[in-house]
Structure formats: structure tokens, C-alpha cells
Amino acid sequence: MGEPLEIDIITIFPVMLNCFLEESILKRAVEKGSVRIRTVNLRDFAKDARRSTDDRPYGGGPGMVMLPEPLLDAVTAVRKPSSRVILMTPQGRKFDQQIAGELALENHLIFICGNYEGIDERVKDELSADELSIGDYVLTNGGLASVVVVDAVVRLLPDVLGCDASTTEESFSAGLLEYPQYTRPPVFRGRKVPEILLSGNHEKIASWRKEQALIRTKEKRPDLLNRQDVQ
Ligand code: ADE
């Protein structure tokens, strides 16, 4: 296996994020050596006795703004020449499966997680970071958004999921939603598994699945059919 993808998440909530990162497939990915994930406590870079990471906004208004210096010092502490710095913000480019695939090819990702009303604008000017949003809504904490991105990226790394095909066949990878899946029993509360899936005819099963994926996509997400990457 190659070098693990390295991920540093700069946050004031390392304990909360570690809970998520230390379970399930992400935990296994770390144990297998596919990825190395570290949370960096922003408070360790605070300059005052109260370990402040934010202050009131110039010009007035509600909420607090994250101080530039602790954030930039935290980035400097972990940054390497090849690092890609990502700022989680609802103002960013909308995260999707294609971006997940791009990030999975990097060797070091640094996530900056904002809180409260936002981050001092000069952090963005200094870093020329990628700004990413996970959707058009505002969370209390960019840390949550960063673990969504980390999860989507890590599962694409080699050897993380049981079978490589599960990442390429699923929703969005071919530009379509996933076909319906069934497991045992063959009849459940009177509902039967489609006959074709029990037939053992792999060619017919593959074309049935493609057709079902198209039907589903037309029904639930017709917007995806207009994208150029649909095969
Ligand atoms: N921080 C707060 N809301 C967010 C969002 N929707 N995406 C990324 N970061 C955020």
C-alpha cells in the first residue's frame, strides 16, 4: 500500500469530532494505514490566559468572529508544501462526489472549521484556501461539515471498503442513483424480491439494474440526468 492520506482538522471541538472518527469504517481505515487523521485543538494556539479563539465583530452586530492569529498559527504548525487547505463554510463550493474523488487523490488535507458568526476575512486572504460547503444551510459548527467530507473521502481510499466495486457502482458515481437492493428472505410480509435477481443470469441482472437506476433517477433526481457525466 502507498503512503496514507494525512488529514488534520483544526477545531475547537476535538473531542466531539474524535468520537465520530474513532468508530466504524473510519476507525478501520486508520488501523489499516489507509489514512492518518488528527484533530488539532485550536485553543492550543490561543494567545491569552482564557485561551480565546474568537472576539466581537468590528462594526458591531451579533455573534463572535474567529481570531485570525490562532487559526493561522495552527495551519502553519501542520502545513507541508503539498498540503491542500480547506475552509469549511456555507459560502463555499458545494461539496459532491466528484470533489470527494479529487480530495482522495491528495496526500495531505487540512480542514479549518469555523464556528459562531464566521472567521476573520484575513484568514481567507492569507491562505487562499479552498472553501467548501456541504449544503445550503448553516450549522453551528464547521467541524460537523468537515467530518462529512472526511467520511466521503476516506471511503474512496484503496482498501477501505470491502470491495472496490462498491464505490464505483453506487449512487452518483455513474451519475445515477443506485438501483434497488434486496437481501434475504425472498418473500417479506408478502413482498417478493424481483424474480430476475434470483435467476443467476448476471447479464440480465446488470441490465435490469441499469434500467432501475435510470427509472429511479428520473423519478427522484431528474436534475442529475442533465449532467454531462451520466453514461
Ligand atoms: N459551517 C456552517 N455551515 C456549514 C455548511 N453548510 N457547510 C460547511 N461549513 C459550514
Image: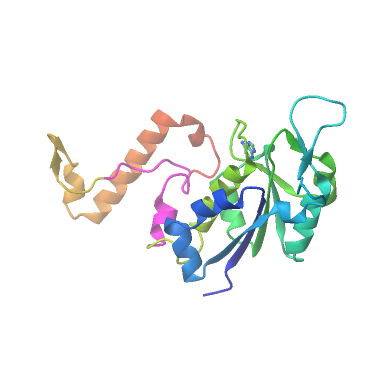
Q: Is residue 32 left or right of residue 5?
A: left
Magenta region: 163-181
Q: Is residue 110 left or right of residue 120?
A: left
Residue found farthest to the bottom: 1
Q: In the depicted view, which residue is nearer to us: 228 or 20?
A: 20
Q: Is residue 141 magenta?
A: no
Residue 17, position as x, y percentages in the image:
56, 50
Look at 73% across and 56% down and name the residue there.
Answer: 44
Residue found farthest to the right: 59
Residue 93, position as x, y percentages in the image:
67, 40
Residue 227, position as x, y percentages in the image:
54, 38
- The quadrant where ligand 1 appears is top right
Tally the marks: 0
Q: In the depicted view, which residue is nearer to us: 128 or 223?
A: 128
Look at 76% across and 45% down and name the residue there.
Answer: 53
Q: Please, what is the dominant secondary structure of the magenta stretch? A: loop
Q: In the depicted view, which residue is nearer to us: 69 or 186?
A: 69
Q: In the depicted view, which residue is nearer to us: 97 or 110?
A: 110
Applied colour scheme: rainbow
Residue found farthest to the front: 49
Q: Quadrant of residue 187?
A: top left
Look at 58% across and 59% down and name the residue there.
Answer: 104
Look at 81% across and 40% down and name the residue there.
Answer: 120
Q: Is residue 170 magenta?
A: yes
Q: Quadrant of residue 200?
A: bottom left
Residue 85, position as x, y percentages in the image:
72, 54
